[in-house]
Amino acid sequence: MRIVIKVGTSTLAHASGRLNIRQVEHLCKVLSDLKNAGHEVILVSSGAIGMGVGKLLLPQRPTDVPTKQAAAAVGQCELMYIYDKLFSEYNHTVAQILLTEGDVDNDERRQNFQNTLYRLLELQALPIINENDTVATEEFGVGDNDTLSAIVARCAGADLLVLLSDIDGLYTSDPRRDSSARLISFVAALTPEIYALAGDKGSDLAVGGMSTKLRAAKTAMDNGFDMVISNGARPEDLYDIVDGKPVGTRFIGKTGLSSAGICE
Ligand code: GLU
């Protein structure tokens, strides 16, 4: 299986912006094992800005573009240093790809990106992709890694996209406010009722929220692959997700269940 896994800042870093060592180590171990089992793994990793905030000891996530881009320049190095170190322990080679919107919008540039990506997979490397935040401003960039990971999965011809988040999946209402909220296990169609369930992002360092995840789900379903939202605090759930077991919320793009909307 070719799997694209997107990991959000809230999984990689503590609220301080400093690395969540236990969680990142665990994630790299599971991803290495999935590769050892024969799967092709592409990681779309956020965290450049968040990690830069931590490393530069900034009091909070910057709002001005130059400081954000400076934080991303510092944080991206830190991020790749850590991935390189942890994946090396399991004998896997990482490769960094930083994309801007133009790289995936323009046919020729997208083809170049795809050629490199396919070659890296043939070479058994583990591509780690982020938006090139140091040059892409929010106005002209993809803007969030939920969307970026869906574009990457489409370009990669992936079988599965997994978004690791700070929430277990899509709920019938906001579980942080409503104790009767229920997790929706399967979504077969993106109905207006499903879109109405998208709430706010859960952490100050994070960028996307449920609405960017639903946008990513639309790309997945339109292109015939499944997308799963799952909690990044439990990377071992990836084993069950890859086996098709019900974990988090699965948006069915592959088998196209009937247009029932929600199947719980
Ligand atoms: N590219 C951003 C970063 O690395 C994150 C964007 C996102 O999390 O959606 O900080």
Image (tube, rainbow, N blue to C red):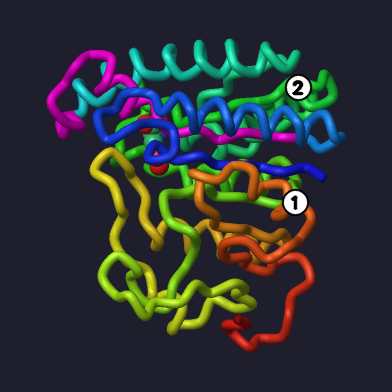
Secondary structure type for disc 2: helix
Please say whether residue 43 is one of the residues in the magenta stretch: yes
Where's the C terminus, which quadrant? bottom right
In the image, residue 35 sits, relative to residue 198, either above or below, namely: above
Q: CA distance from mark 2 to mark 1?
A: 22 Å
Give the class, few, some or many, for how many residues have Cα within 10 Å of label 2's Cα (few <14, many ≥20). Answer: some
Give the magenta part as a residue range.
41-64
Give the class, few, some or many, for how many residues have Cα within 10 Å of label 1's Cα (few <14, many ≥20). Answer: many
Q: Position of residue 141 (x, y in %)?
A: 38, 38
Q: Position of residue 54 (x, y in %)?
A: 26, 21
Q: Nearer the viewer, residue 133 or 84?
A: 84
Dividing the picture into quarters, in which one does residue 34 lie? top right
Residue under the point 78% across and 35% down: 40
> Can you identify the residue that label 2 sits on?
120
Q: Amino acid at mark 1?
A: Val
Q: Position of residue 262 (x, y in %)?
A: 57, 82
Residue under the point 60% across and 78% down: 189
Q: Position of residue 82 (x, y in %)?
A: 51, 15
In this image, 202 relative to 108: left or right?
A: left
Q: Quadrant of ligand 1?
A: top left
Please say whether residue 258 is one of the residues in the magenta stretch: no
In the image, residue 157 sits, relative to residue 230, either above or below, namely: above
Q: Nearer the viewer, residue 81 or 223?
A: 81
Where's the N terminus, which quadrant? top right
Residue under the point 63% across and 61% down: 247
Residue under the point 75% across and 13% down: 91
Q: Earlier in the sequence, mark 2 or mark 1?
A: 2
Q: Amino acid at mark 2?
A: Leu
Q: Are marks 2 and 1 in contact (CB under 8 Å)?
A: no
